[in-house]
Amino acid sequence: MNPTLRSARRVVIALGGNAMTGPDGSATPHAQRDALREAAGHIAEVVARGVQVVLTHGNGPQVGNLLVKNELAAHVVPPVPLDWCVAQTQATIAFTLTDELDAALEARGLPQRTAGLVTRTLVDVDDPHFREPSKPVGRFLPKEEAERFVSLGQVWEDRGEKGWRRVVASPEPRSVVDAPAIHALAAAGFVVVCAGGGGIPVTDDGRDGAALRGVEAVIDKDLTAAILASDLDADTLVIATDVANVMVDFGTPTARPLGRVTAAELREHAAAGQFARGSMGPKVDAVLRFLDRNDSAHPPRRAVITSLEHIADAVAGDDAGTVLTA
Amino acid sequence: MNPTLRSARRVVIALGGNAMTGPDGSATPHAQRDALREAAGHIAEVVARGVQVVLTHGNGPQVGNLLVKNELAAHVVPPVPLDWCVAQTQATIAFTLTDELDAALEARGLPQRTAGLVTRTLVDVDDPHFREPSKPVGRFLPKEEAERFVSLGQVWEDRGEKGWRRVVASPEPRSVVDAPAIHALAAAGFVVVCAGGGGIPVTDDGRDGAALRGVEAVIDKDLTAAILASDLDADTLVIATDVANVMVDFGTPTARPLGRVTAAELREHAAAGQFARGSMGPKVDAVLRFLDRNDSAHPPRRAVITSLEHIADAVAGDDAGTVLTA
């Protein structure tokens, strides 16, 4: 049987920002609820196909809001570190998604229910990204206001007309600390919402008996999804985004969508600079890593990049989205 | 065998504010981490006795901080409802506690690890407490500032010299929506941190296929702990607080600690007004409810109110704390 036509057994789905923000990108409670209600319908269709589903998701605008609150209330309430903000977004997004997905599952007569797990992701203390923070977070501020935070040890960059913006490290995810708990929940029949925002970044200083420690960083959620899918022995990784297919020659007369593609072909496109850094680039990187971690002891893996409305077909092995096989 | 001397099999421990705030009641990240590190040591000692442990916890000062942030950033970032704030505190406390408890377990050579679950608690839409909000939350404000929030639909009370303070409903917890996921994690060997702050309050409007909805309320964490312990078929409920024993005739020359006590005796003390509302009262109420929900199909239950340093002895059945039996 063609492995690209095989039905999935366990799938990790990474939801992009469009699944949890309004059309204008706003992350108000109402906008988040409306977007997640729509996403829940598509996810329930995947569950209906008899597949174990583990969900992870982004959190950019949500973290941005929390950083602004930190800043504006700092004279009354001590600000909390970025890792706390990531944790906070995990809970509010999981809360909304479990409500909406439980309803969508119930409406389809499906017995599964949803569980939201607070999830830590291990990063290396000496990850080189800590020396060169590059991921912008929070809002733009005038130079004079930004300087106050620089004096507190934060890194801010001059972004021209819009003003200054904080940048933080985006270290490589090494492992999902709570993967065994995610596995236990999935094995017990739950749809698991976990590792939101790439997971709460923690480091291990290696001392015996020392606790893990949160660090001020954000982790690329698609890279964490690739590790999670691998650790959970999922056969399929789906990166749900706002386009149906990965495009090559984007914005030119020869622009075309990628359908089925091999790792070698996709790597070639990536090497030719086809995919934008900070946009399609990390998604392509993530699906390639997921396939690379495959070994002969496991059935062949498949990874899909597509939009929410196509995820059920893509997981079932039907012709939908950009489908990557070894 | 005397049931009060029986070792516990599965225990629900409700941690009070002193387990996660500084000696001055502050809920800064450092104060929270230091307090939870100490609590983790005592909890690990309970796990070391071979007992399945499910942890729940309060969140008063933490929610208060988030409400202040909501308020001070409202002109830039849309405030989030109280149920979102409860969710946020579940994640930050679970995150800190899983880090510290995992380290404490590892240091003792114990194989168990910790998992933090985002947890919803169902309350009735028509709970009478919604008509008479009485639970103070957040900070005191001068009348003029409070009036702005009253005009937005909130209820604030004049608290005299300190100023005005918001009051919200504290409805009865009916069931812990995520109890099946908690059970699955506990059965798989995890110490589960869940139902923080009494759980995120949600209501079910009864319409087919409609999602649960968060409501602006706070639930008494000890009452939720009693329901959780019952739903999980725990044999022991421990309310960990800052005193070793429940006192009667508190503040008088005949003051004395309660050791072993029957439900009938404790109920008599409660009826005589021995326990302060909003302090020991709800804890006594919670342990009595837990025993009341016992039925003949289950082994006899035991409930303990004591301080963190005595919880391991109390769970093992040794003579510690105020121990309630049927």
Image (cartoon, coloured by chain):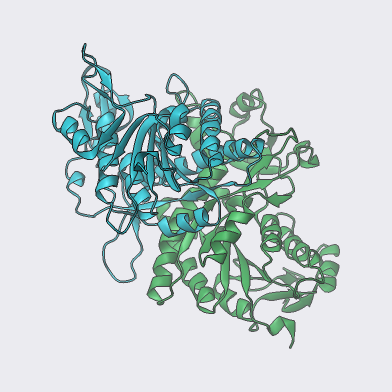
Chain colours: A cyan, B green
Residue plotted at (37% across, 46% down): A83
Residue plotted at (72% across, 44% down): B123
From the viewer's perspective, tell me whether residue A305 is left or right of residue A32.
Answer: left
Considering every residue shown, the one lying at the far top of the view is: A253
Considering every residue shown, the one lying at the far left of the view is: A272
| Res. B216 in view | no
x then y, percent, for residue B39: 49, 67
Q: Quadrant of residue A286?
A: top left
Q: Quadrant of residue A4?
A: top left
| Res. A101 in view | yes
> Looking at this view, is A82 or B35 the one in front?
A82
> Looking at this view, is A100 or A112 the one in front?
A112
Q: Quadrant of the C terminus of chain A?
A: top left
From the viewer's perspective, tell me whether residue A253 is left or right of residue B124.
Answer: left
x then y, percent, for residue A236: 38, 44
Residue plotted at (56% across, 40% down): A48
Considering every residue shown, the one lying at the far front of the view is: A1
> Looking at this view, is A163 or A325 the one in front?
A325
Vertical placement of residue B20 versus B213, above or below: below
x then y, percent, for residue B150: 66, 27
Vertical placement of residue B132 versus B5, above or below: above
From the viewer's perspective, tell me whether residue A168 is left or right of residue A305.
Answer: left
